[in-house]
Image: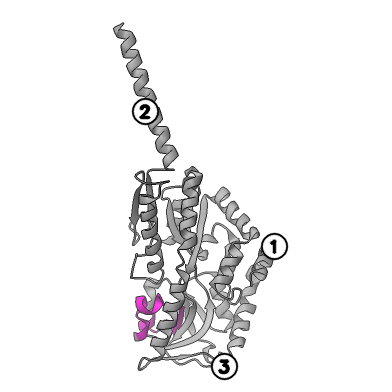
Amino acid sequence: MKNILIAVLIMVAIASLMMNFSSRKEMSGGEKITFATSATFYPNTGEAIGITKYVEALEGLFKHNPAFKGNVDFRTYTRSSMFPNPAAHLEAASTNAIQITYNGPQEIEMLEPAYKVANIPGLFNDFDHFSRAMNSDAWKKVEDRLAAKKGIKIIHWGYDAGVMYIFSRDKIETLSDIEGLRIRYPGGDAWRLGLVGLKTNPIPLPYTEVVTALQTNLIDGLISDFAGGVPYLGLKDYTTHATLVPVSIQPIAVIASAQWWGSLTTAQQVAIDKMFAVLDINHYYDQLTSELIAEWGNSEGLTSVTPVDLDDWRKAMKASAISLVDGIDEALLEAIKDAE
């Protein structure tokens, strides 16, 4: 009798453990969720404000939404505290070492070459044009392929971190004025070829080396954005002239581990998708950029010019970089055209 009672108690305990595990798995696709980036959160970099708002929203979602409430340990790591750079964070997400991060297309194109079109000068009119293209059926198939083959799920193309403009020591008023100047760019063939089209000498440098390069006259100027480059690099002290030629947009994508995303319930996936659908950060950046351009133009010792031959600048950059679309599926290019 004693042995039977012990056996029953053991069976009840095992059944309880199995029910608890099943319930926990159904309620959340993983109790620990890690969001890690190589950049800082608010307010130190151009994209930081937007990323911080997403992190705050995700924290609230995981805490209060019925699909997640009480079942998620949401942890954030910033300033390269986990991995040294955006590419490493992307790789970490692909192996589910972290669950969420963010990246620009210049990192994502290392896994899926089609995204190299994102930074081609003149290909996209603005972020709204880009966003419409990315939401097309043709580009959604690329996202599906990226998730299936590379382990990366693009949750949301969030916002444009800032249009890239040209900053320099000397005033540049016409296309001929920039010829031969040493212009820094962050890396990537689209920006390099765009600058080649302007007949400059393009020099790739990470953000950490820009100020030193300006101080030592290694470069004459750079392409950067008002929202991030001006405050983060202190450009007012080194490049007193801004040439308002839009070189390209800077789309930011929220990235997830495809393995983690696949482990979520349908209700959890829908909750995350809805959150991003209603959280519009891009218009904030449009307003911020406009305010910073106006502030720059009204500051003593600083000048900004929109060249009278702006169309020639755009044509020169696009003609030089458009070769990057070679090999891109025609359906993807057609989707970009249809989204105009």
Locate the N terminus by quadrant: top left
Three-letter code for the amino acid on which mark 2 is drawn: Leu
Classify 60 as above or below 319. above
Tell me: 280 left or right of 82.
Answer: right
Determine which residue is flagged by label 2. 17
x 36%, y 93%: residue: 301
Classify 259 as above or below 108. above
- Counting every numbered tag in the picture gives 3
Q: Earlier in the sequence, mark 3 or mark 2?
A: 2
x 53%, y 81%: residue: 246
Q: Secondary structure at mark 1?
A: helix
Classify 331 as above or below 299. above
Inspect this view and state whether residue 284 appears: yes
Looking at the image, which residue sits at the far left?
2
Q: CA distance from mark 3 to mark 1?
A: 35 Å
| Image marks 2 and 1: residues in contact by CB distance under 8 Å | no
Three-letter code for the amino acid on which mark 1 is drawn: Ala
Q: Earlier in the sequence, mark 3 or mark 1?
A: 3
Determine which residue is flagged by label 1. 331
Residue 21: % across, % down = 39, 33
Of labels 3 and 2, the one closer to you: 2
Classify 33 as above or below 172. above
x 35%, y 50%: residue: 63
Give residue 308's mark.
3
Residue 69: % across, % down = 37, 46
- Corner quadrant of residue 211: bottom left
| Image marks 3 and 2: residues in contact by CB distance under 8 Å | no
Residue 340: % across, % down = 64, 73
Q: Earlier in the sequence, mark 2 or mark 1?
A: 2
Q: Secondary structure at mark 2?
A: helix
Crowdedness near tag 1: few (<14), some (14–19) or many (≥20) residues, C-alpha within 10 Å = few
